[in-house]
């Protein structure tokens, strides 16, 4: 499953840093530079003991679920030409014994978390090679805002929040919303941006992509492991950009551009087919149970589930890069503190 892009290309490992050694300002500096970072030992043992791939289904199984790529795949399917549909149909019948129409019917039907988990398990035998969009169709995966609202999950996360995320959530809300009590701010941050992920081993929900609206996020892995490849948007021309833009969960009156897809597969690279991929500067790394990854603003990225995964992400969809704003904010505060300290020292020397 793991083909290291760094072996031949220009990829660098994502920096790994223990949460106890990562200052607030340092985190914001990485965010402002649009560099990913994996934060280790970032999740409380209590939270890890409460949640994994199986317990999520046990505790939230009756919650309604949407499929991770429902909007994305529906948009693709509904915009296929007759020729493209025939190609996708033949491939899906060969791989999954399912026609495009049958697959579309699956996408639009309502499922609970438990029903979707059972559907995932029924396709575990499938071995995808990721050469065509249809390869991402099955098994279905779950990434859903609504499922995050499962009372047991939401309550557990609010009871055992991440230390650095508390401060980040508070800073983010202070910058972009009106001031309230700290506890209320954190609850608002978690409720507004939380998304639950549930996916079986050896799956990818989506081809390499970039959210055309500004978006950055933290993802914490409560169970399993996820492999990431991440590029700055300036490297996009080396990644075989597609003219296709796909409707996403962020679509609204403010964000109507959709996701931009890229044809190059940086997780299992084919340099003969995509020679410019070898020249693309980026980052790669595997995020394991108990770790959190920051995915930078405006980045191009692709993800593969290396094991059965349960994870939660907090997405910040704003009109500007939050990390850059927070870095400016903390730098300004530090300068004010330095200026105040210098003034106090000067005053003390004058008195002496």
Image (spheres, rainbow, N blue to C red):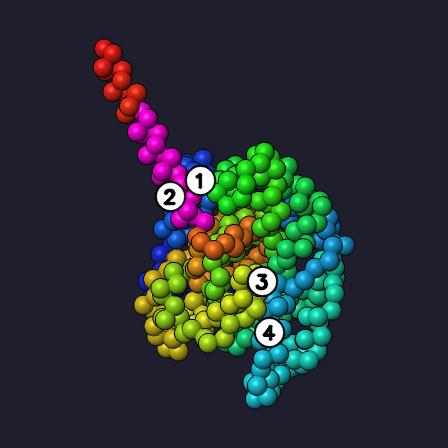
In-front residue for pair 242/91: 242
Q: Is residue 72 above or below residue 78?
A: above
- Name the residue carrying label 3: 252
Q: Can residue 351 be spotted in the picture?
A: yes
Up/down of 250 relative to 74, above or below: above
Name the residue at the bottom extreme.
Answer: 83
Residue 138 sits inside the magenta stretch: no
Q: Give the residue drawn at x 35%, y 39%.
A: 331
As measured in the structure, the alpha-carbon distance from the residue carrying label 1 to the one carrying label 2 is 24 Å
Position of residue 210 in the picture relative to residue 11 (left or right): right
Rendering coords of residue 318 (x, y %): 50, 54
Cα separation, mark 1 vs mark 4, equals: 40 Å
Q: Pointers 1 and 3 in contact (CB under 8 A)?
A: no
Q: Which residue is mark 1?
A: 18
**Mark 3 residue element:** loop
**Across the whole image, how many numbered discs are drawn on residues?**
4
Between circles 4 and 3, the one closer to the viewer is 3
- Mark 4, residue position: 75
Instruction: Classify 10 Å Cα crowding around label 3: few (below 14), some (14-19), many (20 and above).
Output: few
Q: Main secondary structure of the magenta part?
A: helix
For marks 4 and 2, give the one nearer the viewer.
Answer: 2
Is residue 160 visible in the rendered image? The answer is no
């Amino acid at each position: 499953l793991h083909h290291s892009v760094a072996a031949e290309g220009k990829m660098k490992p994502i920096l790994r840093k223990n949460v106890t050694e990562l200052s607030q300002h340092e985190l914001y500096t990485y965010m402002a530079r649009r560099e990913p970072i994996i934060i280790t030992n970032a999740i409380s043992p209590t939270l890890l003991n409460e949640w994994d791939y199986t317990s999520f289904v046990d505790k939230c199984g009756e919650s309604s679920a949407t499929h991770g790529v429902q909007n994305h795949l529906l948009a693709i399917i509904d915009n296929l030409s007759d020729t493209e549909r025939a190609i996708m149909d033949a491939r899906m019948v060969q791989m999954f014994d399912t026609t495009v129409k049958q697959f579309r019917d699956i996408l639009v039907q309502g499922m609970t978390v438990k029903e979707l988990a059972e559907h995932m398990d029924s396709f575990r035998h499938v071995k995808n090679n990721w050469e065509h969009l249809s390869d991402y169709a099955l098994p279905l995966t779950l990434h859903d805002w609504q499922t995050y609202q499962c009372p047991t999950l939401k309550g557990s996360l609010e009871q055992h929040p991440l230390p650095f995320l508390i401060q980040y959530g508070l800073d983010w809300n202070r910058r972009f919303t009106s001031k309230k009590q700290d506890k209320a701010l954190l609850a608002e941050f978690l409720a507004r941006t939380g998304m639950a992920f549930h996916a079986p081993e050896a799956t990818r929900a989506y081809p390499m992509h970039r959210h055309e609206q500004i978006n950055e996020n933290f993802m914490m892995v409560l169970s399993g492991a996820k492999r990431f490849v991440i590029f700055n948007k300036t490297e996009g021309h080396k990644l075989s950009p597609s003219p296709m833009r796909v409707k996403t969960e962020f679509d609204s009156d403010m964000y109507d551009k959709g996701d931009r897809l890229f044809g190059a597969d940086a997780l299992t690279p084919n340099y003969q087919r995509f020679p410019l991929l070898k020249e693309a500067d980026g980052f790669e790394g595997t995020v394991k149970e108990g770790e959190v990854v920051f995915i930078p603003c405006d980045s191009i990225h692709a993800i593969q589930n290396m094991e059965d995964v349960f994870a939660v992400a907090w997405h910040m969809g704003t009109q500007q890069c939050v990390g850059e704003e927070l870095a400016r904010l903390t730098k300004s505060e530090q300068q004010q503190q330095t200026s105040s300290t210098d003034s106090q020292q000067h005053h003390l020397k004058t008195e002496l």
